[in-house]
Image (tube, rainbow, N blue to C red):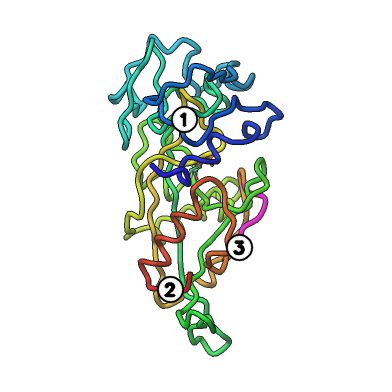
Amino acid sequence: MSKKLHSKACTGTYANTSIRRGEVPSDKISFATPFPNYHPVDYTADFVKSGPVWADPANPSVLKFNTIDGATDRTSFVGYSVENGFPQNPIGRTGVTGRGNLGKWGPNHAADPILSSWKRDECGEKVYDPISRRPILRFVAIFRKKDSEWAIPGGMCDPGENISQTLKREFAEEALNSNDYPERKEIAENIFKKGIKIYQGYVDDPRNTDNAWMETQAYNFHDEIGKLDFVKLEAGDDAAAVKWTDISSDLALYASHKDFIEKVAKLHDAHW
Ligand code: RP5
């Protein structure tokens, strides 16, 4: 795993807090590299400790790791070990132990739906970038309220939910505001019929800790003929805004989302 894919998870302050992560030099990220001066901060948010339904118990010894544990999937796309009873981040040190803002010990599984279509002019013709001479692709992005960052409208898998259900539910909640307009779930059902898996694995998420981290499956649903350009987007749930966003290497997105979008651009031979 390159530094690039494990960088937001081990630098600066911990997500949405003023808690400084213990220092992790780039050559000491791997747990296999000895680092006797490692001093991680132990942090689990109060809202996680208070025991909401989506969170694990404080003591991980009652959990079954690396398997499907009841309704919770504790398997990993990258594999992980359990050290002294605590699951260990498969990529390496983050400067924080505990669960931080995450509910599950070990992998916290998510799904990322990437809806794409071509940028078109008033005549319906594809728009090309003047320098790369490639057509410009767009995707539906949401603005994450808590993080103040643009992102793919992804979200956590609910216990027992399959990936296809999570992809549709999250897009409907965040990009169509289906919480207020439940009938819009039907739109997501129709959009997300045939997708291409773009990525599965670890996410460089600012909430990751040494003992809890994000993993995702990102799927691309591409609308070649622009039939979805007129779907009414409306931000809901954790999203403050939603919009079709031109894809280019200038994008700044939450967690590893820019990497996923780059894969989509390359897949369609679009401008990047
Ligand atoms: C990221 O966090 C994933 O890629 C996914 O987009 C997101 C899920 O977390 P929530 O949106 O539910 O907070 O790591």
Q: Which residue is under mark 1?
A: 28
Question: Could you tell me which secondary element the residue under label 1 belongs to?
Answer: helix
- The residue located at (57%, 48%) in the rendering is 254
Q: CA distance from mark 1 to mark 2?
A: 37 Å
Q: Which residue is under mark 2?
A: 270
Query: x%, y% of residue 97?
Result: 53, 20
Query: x%, y% of residue 144?
Result: 63, 47
Amino acid type of disc 2? Ala
Residue interval drawn in magenta: 239-243
Q: Which one is earlier in the sequence, the residue at label 1 or at label 3? A: 1
Between circles 1 and 3, the one closer to the viewer is 1
Amino acid type of disc 3? Lys
For the view shown, which residue lies furthest in the left direction?
67
- The residue located at (51%, 86%) in the rendering is 124
- The residue located at (62%, 22%) in the rendering is 45
Question: Could you tell me which secondary element the residue under label 3 belongs to?
Answer: strand
Is 32 on the left or on the right of 252, as rendered? left
Q: CA distance from mark 1 to mark 3?
A: 39 Å
Q: CA distance from mark 3 to mark 2?
A: 19 Å
Query: x%, y% of residue 69?
Result: 32, 21
Q: Which one is earlier in the sequence, the residue at label 3 or at label 2? A: 3
- Can residue 190 be seen here? no
Is 49 on the left or on the right of 76, as rendered? right
The label shown at residue 45 is none
Amino acid type of disc 1? Lys
The image shows residue 30, relative to residue 263, as above or below, that is above
Between circles 1 and 2, the one closer to the viewer is 1
- The residue located at (52%, 67%) in the rendering is 247
Query: x%, y% of residue 232?
Result: 58, 65
**Magenta region's main secondary structure?**
strand
Q: Which residue is under mark 3?
A: 243
